[in-house]
Image (tube, rainbow, N blue to C red):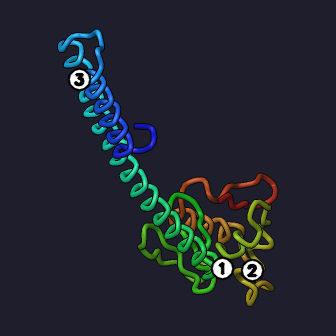
Amino acid sequence: MLGGKWYGILISFLILGFVYVAFFTSNLHFSAYALFTFTASLLTFNAFSLIFLNKIEQDSLSMQTHIHTEVAKRKIQERIVEKIHQQDILELKEGYFWDTKRKILSHENNSITLTQKEQQLLTLLLQNKNHCVSFEEIQVALWEEKYDEEISLHSVKMQVTKLRKKLPKGCIKNVYGCGYIFHR
């Protein structure tokens, strides 16, 4: 059976043939019951071996199919990730994505409407990810045309609060005495 199921069956029948020839042509000292037992044992072994080898072949084919399916899934995932990187789409947290070119925030394939100020604020925070963005930097970025006028700290906080409501919890954190930081 080690050489393959059909090779094993051929060898078994050759052995069986030699035993029968030897039994009938030679004066062997074993009974017809012994010959029957040997034959039944050999045939039973072959039957179980065939069943076992067929099961191994089926499992092998099943595993190959599963592997091909998983490889195909992996390739699709890699293409999606590649497209995400090519299109300048950033994955934020919890299924949120930010399209840096079109300035579109999405979650689970649904667009989330952002005002122009919220877009500017999110862009600023993402450009400075993991670094504190000061209140003054936010004021300059969001109200550059009116920066000469006094833009209140309350206006900055209001824009951050509005943006926070549209993002996953914990993305924008306060840094005492500095400003805000975005964590992806």
Q: Quadrant of residue 182?
A: bottom right
Query: Disc 1 and disc 3: Cα gap in Å?
Result: 99 Å
Secondary structure beneath label 1: helix
Please report contact status of discs 3 and 2: CB closer than 8 Å, yes or no.
no
Q: Nearer the viewer, residue 172 or 142?
A: 172
Residue 159, above or below 181? below
Q: Amino acid at mark 1?
A: Gln
Which residue is the site of mark 1? 120
Residue 77 placement (x, y as % from top left): 52, 67
Question: At 29% from the left edge and 30% from the top edge, which residue is drawn?
Answer: 16
Which residue is the site of mark 3? 24
Question: At 28% from the left edge and 28% from the top edge, which residue is drawn?
Answer: 21
Q: Amino acid at mark 2?
A: Ala
* Pointer 1 or 3: first along the chain: 3
Name the side, left or right, on which 113 lies relative to 28.
Answer: right
Q: Quadrant of the C terminus?
A: bottom right
Q: Nearer the viewer, residue 158 or 128?
A: 128
Query: Disc 1 and disc 2: Cα gap in Å?
Result: 7 Å
Q: Residues within 10 Å of mark 3 (few under 14, many from 20)?
A: few
Query: Disc 3 and disc 2: Cα gap in Å?
Result: 104 Å
Please report contact status of discs 1 and 2: CB closer than 8 Å, yes or no.
yes
